[in-house]
Amino acid sequence: MQGLMYRLAELDADSAGLVRVIDYFDALVRHGADTASMLRASAALADCVVGIDISGWSGSSEPRRCDPRGRWSPQPRLAPSASKDVVVDDVVVGSVWIERPGASLPLDDMLVDRMALTAAIILQPRRVLSDAEHTRNLLFPMDELAVLTSCAALRIEPSTPVRVLVYTARGGARLPLPGELAPGRSTEIEVDGDSLMLLAESCEPTKEFADVARSRSVQVGLSLAGPASDANTLVGTAKFARSQASGLEPIGNADDLGALNLLVAGQSLAHAAIPDLVHAAELRDSEQGAELLATLRVYLRSGTLRAAAESMHLHHSSVAHRLTKLSRHLGFAVDAIENRARATALMMVIDNR
């Protein structure tokens, strides 16, 4: 919005003054000005005495006037040359005015209008957000400032490693997750029929939790791990993991999907967030690790252990030994049929780096 205002000012020289006045008062709001600082700033901008009377507002004091040098109740007191009501929630709670000696200036009406609007914003009762609202703002932030504000309110360091757990809430019936698993003051929230919860990175759903999910036919997704400040990027991987869960295995873990997480639509994941790619990158830097990865590449292309052995002029037991060794390094059985897509995605990413 600020950029649009300045482009407008460039196109129309007459509007440049209006833009500066608007931006001046917007800056006061952004920096959390109170009515006293707003009055001083207004007097400095107007270069004359300005005043405010909000004695009708709960808890407010007598009318105040200020001159351009910041002095209160200066004399003599002149009749207002321009004034405007201050309206909060459709109720007139007072007024602001300018005491300009002599003829009014072209921007006086705009200035007093912005004074009234800024005073109304300052006086507007501010509701304190709940922990649930801060959790929502952290998972679905408007901007970076919202992330930092939510982290501070929830008492979570932005660098704290977390995961996101998601499942479909059925009629409000929530799964029994202990509250102490959630970092800081974060809490479980419901968004568009999904229940979401922040968890500590080390948290793993228990067998009892899985049994409850299975008995209720609820599929659960657990995201990759990442810093709390990037929690919004983890939501997609949690939902992707949930989509891979089943009635028999009701909990899908994004870690078990490896590089397939890069298929999550609308999100750009850093390779460093995917453990499979981190481990593979470490292996590739050594001669032995590169040999293990090359063996996996041939195995995936050949389709069978014996075909891979023939292609590499090795005994099939040597190929099996290398794959077993690679599986230990990566943390999953690369030659298991259920991990074929995971291993293939891993090699595709590694080969395209």
Image: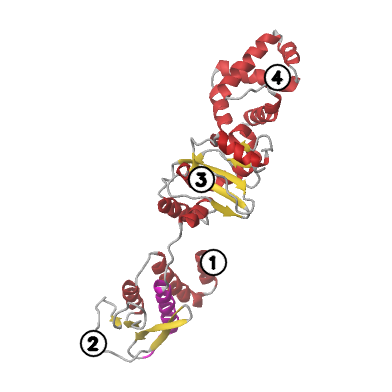
Q: Could you give the CA–CA distance between mark 1 and mark 4, rounded to whole angstroms?
A: 56 Å
Q: Circle 3 sits on which residue?
A: 198
Which of the two labelled residues, at mark 1 and mark 4, occupies the earlier sequence position? 1
Q: Residue at x 66, y 40 (%)?
A: 263
Which of the two labelled residues, at mark 1 and mark 2, occupies the earlier sequence position? 1
The C terminus appears in which quarter of the rendering? Answer: top right
Please, which colouring scheme is shown?
secondary structure
Crowding near the residue tagged with mark 1, few <14, some 14–19, many ≥20 C-alpha atoms within 10 Å: few
Q: Circle 4 sits on which residue?
A: 298
Q: Which mark is residue 4?
A: 1
Type of the residue with mark 3: Leu
Element carrying mark 4: helix
Q: x and y percent of residue 155 in the render? A: 40, 49
Q: Could you give the CA–CA distance between mark 4 and mark 2, rounded to whole angstroms?
A: 91 Å
Type of the residue with mark 2: Gln
Q: Circle 2 sits on which residue?
A: 75
Image check: 203 left or right of 255? left
Element carrying mark 1: helix
Which of the two labelled residues, at mark 2 and mark 3, occupies the earlier sequence position? 2
Type of the residue with mark 1: Leu
Type of the residue with mark 4: Val
Q: Could you give the CA–CA distance between mark 4 and mark 3, rounded to whole angstroms?
A: 40 Å
Which of the two labelled residues, at mark 4 and mark 2, occupies the earlier sequence position? 2
Specify start and end residues of the magenta stretch as a single range.
103-123
* Callout in the foreground (4, 2): 4
Q: x and y percent of residue 329 in the render? A: 56, 21
* Callout in the foreground (4, 3): 3
* Callout in the foreground (1, 2): 2
Element carrying mark 3: strand
